[in-house]
Structures are given as structure tokens and as C-alpha cells.
Image (tube, rainbow, N blue to C red):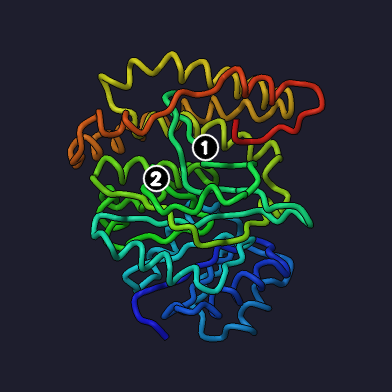
Amino acid sequence: MAEGVSAAIINWNGGELVLKCARTIVEQSLPPSELIIIDNGSTDGSLDRLRAEHPRAKVTANPRNLGFARAANQAVANATGRWLLLANLDIELEPTYIARLVAAGDKDPRIGSVTGKLLRPAGGSAAIVDSTGHVLFRNGWAGNRGENLPDSGQWERPEEVFGVTAAAALYRMSMLAEVCQGSARPFDERFFAYIEDVDLDWRARWLGWKAWYEPAVAWHHRSATKARRSAFILRHILKNRLLLVANNDLWPQGLLRLPGVAAFTILAATQFGLEAPSSLLGLIDFVRLLPSSGARRRFVKSKRKVPADSIASWMQPYPYLKQITRRFGSGTTRSAAV
């Protein structure tokens, strides 16, 4: 076993998929020195099956679903390696995934996170890109680079990206330690689930850390638990969009972007409200939680190592017209990631 890499799976009723995920992790050409399983109150027997197949794994069994962010922090707390591979239950890694990501990260000590090429299976046709890293927009939102495009060889160049999706990310443990605010853990637990990885991206950027894309393949059976479109999850996403900005977009430059944040919030709230009216409670959640973002902002301001222009250079214009047409046009499929 290779020392230095911890691997953690976040499970919630993962069924057969989480078993496949664990197998592809332990069968890597560079296997992790430890396997960590964080279970969020599964009731489908998947935790018992994981324990049976991996008796040496470090297991944390939460009594209920505490959310991805808290589970990810539990994984960080349990990890002893120099790197931590964090994996969703619906991920399958190609055999050299960990080795290639570690090699890429080791080329530069300021690389704090690395992602591979996440693909969605598409039957007999070309695979569809799930993510090749995060992109940041001027309205404070982020998206997955290349998402929903067919993979036709255009993502084979390793390069720096704004950030990485936590679905199959390699994090440098020293970076995760540095971006903590006091007793707060790397992932903001107010987010519960969704966008907490972008929040980490942004904070790490302020502290001078880089994110890297290495085109090693992982397969992402996205939203296999069927929870993504629930009113409960949409409520969290609406809240988290605003907490992301409140935590990270520092003034005075951030003031200039507030009109875009407001326009985007209206767009998202309209979409979510039509789909699940109770999701609009996320706006109330945000107002209730906003005061606690003050400590996050003060931490970033006191610890930041790069100028505001460095962050702004990563921000792209948001394609409002294209997104409005796609989200509200007849016969289209809407996504939670507006």
C-alpha cells in the first residue's frame, strides 16, 4: 500500500453503486493507505455490505443524514494521509486515477486540489462531460467546465482551473488545514449539501492555493440517490448560492457585482418556485444564516495572500439569455445548477 493518500467515501443509501465505488478505489494502481467510510444514516444495508467487503476501513456511522458538508469534514478529521481523495458514492474511478492526480499535485506545492475528467455514461454514444473543474461567474455562481458536452477529446490538456468538484477530488491535507477558520472545518456545514465545494475553492484561492485539472477519467452516475430535484435540496441550493457570495466576494469590488447576484437570484428563485414553491424558504434560511458569514469574511480578509484582481481574473460573464432559453423553453430539461 502506498503511504500518503487517504480515500473517503460519503455514503447515503448507495446500494450497489457505493460498493462499486469502493472497489475501484482499493483496486487503484496507487491504492490508498486507508479507506474511510462516512455513512449518513443509510437504511438500505449498504453500510453493512461495505463493512463486510472492507473490514479494515475506518467507519463513521451517523445516526441520520447530516449532509455532505459535515460528512466531508468528518472524512478530513479521520484522514492521516498527505492527500485526501474525497468520493461521492456514485463515482467509479479508472485504475490510474489516484496515481495521475497525485503526480499532478506533487509538481507544485501550491496546488491544493486536483480533479480528473468526470464523465457520465451515455450508452452507445459518446460519453457526456460531467465536470473538468469549476468555473466562476461574475454573478457569484459557479458551474462545471464542459458540463453536458460530449467528450470528443477536447479536454485532454492538463491545466489550472478555478476549482474542483468534491465528487472525485484530491485535496492536499495541509491546504485543508490552512483554510479552516478557527474551529470551523474546511466545508461550511451551513450548506448541508451542494456548492460547499465551490465555497472551499474560493476561500482557498484567496489564500493563494491553486486547483489543477488532470484528464484521468472517473465515471459519475450523477444523482443516483434521486434526491437532487427534491424541494428540500432546491431549498438548500437557493440558500447556498447566496451564502457563497456572502462568504467570499469581498468589498469594494464585490459591491459592483451585487446587481448580477440579485438578477441571478431572481432567475433561480423563479425557476425553483415554479418547480417546488417550498424551495423559496431558502431565501429565509439565507437571511437567518447571513450574520454568521461575517466571521468567514473576516477570516478571508485577514489571511488572504492574493489581490482582488487575481480572483476577478477567473470570473466569466454569465450567459443569461442562453440559460433563460434553456431553463424555460418548451421541452427542455431543467437542472438544479442554473
Q: Is residue 297 above or below residue 50?
A: above
Give the number of the mark in front: 2 or 1.
Answer: 2
For disc 1, the marked residue is: 143
Apparent side of residue 333 relative to residue 244 in the rendered image (left or right): right
Apparent side of residue 28 relative to residue 201 in the rendered image (left or right): right
**Who is closer to the viewer here, 112 or 291?**
112
Tell me what residue is drawn at x 50 percent, y 68 percent.
Answer: 97
Q: Is residue 1 above or below residue 284?
A: below
Residue 258 visible, this orientation? yes
**Who is closer to the viewer here, 41 or 56?**
56
Q: Residue 62 at x, y = what percent?
A: 56, 64
Apparent side of residue 180 relative to residue 17 in the rendered image (left or right): left
Mark 1 lies on a secondary structure that is strand
Query: Which image quadrant: the C terminus?
Result: top right
Q: Residue 50 at x, y = what percent?
A: 63, 77
Tell me what residue is drawn at x 54 percent, y 25 percent.
Answer: 283
**Who is closer to the viewer here, 7 or 192?**
7
Identity, as a three-letter code, of the amino acid under mark 1: Gly
Q: Residue 235 at x, y = what percent?
A: 61, 34
For disc 2, the marked residue is: 161
Which picture quadrant has residue 231?
Answer: top right
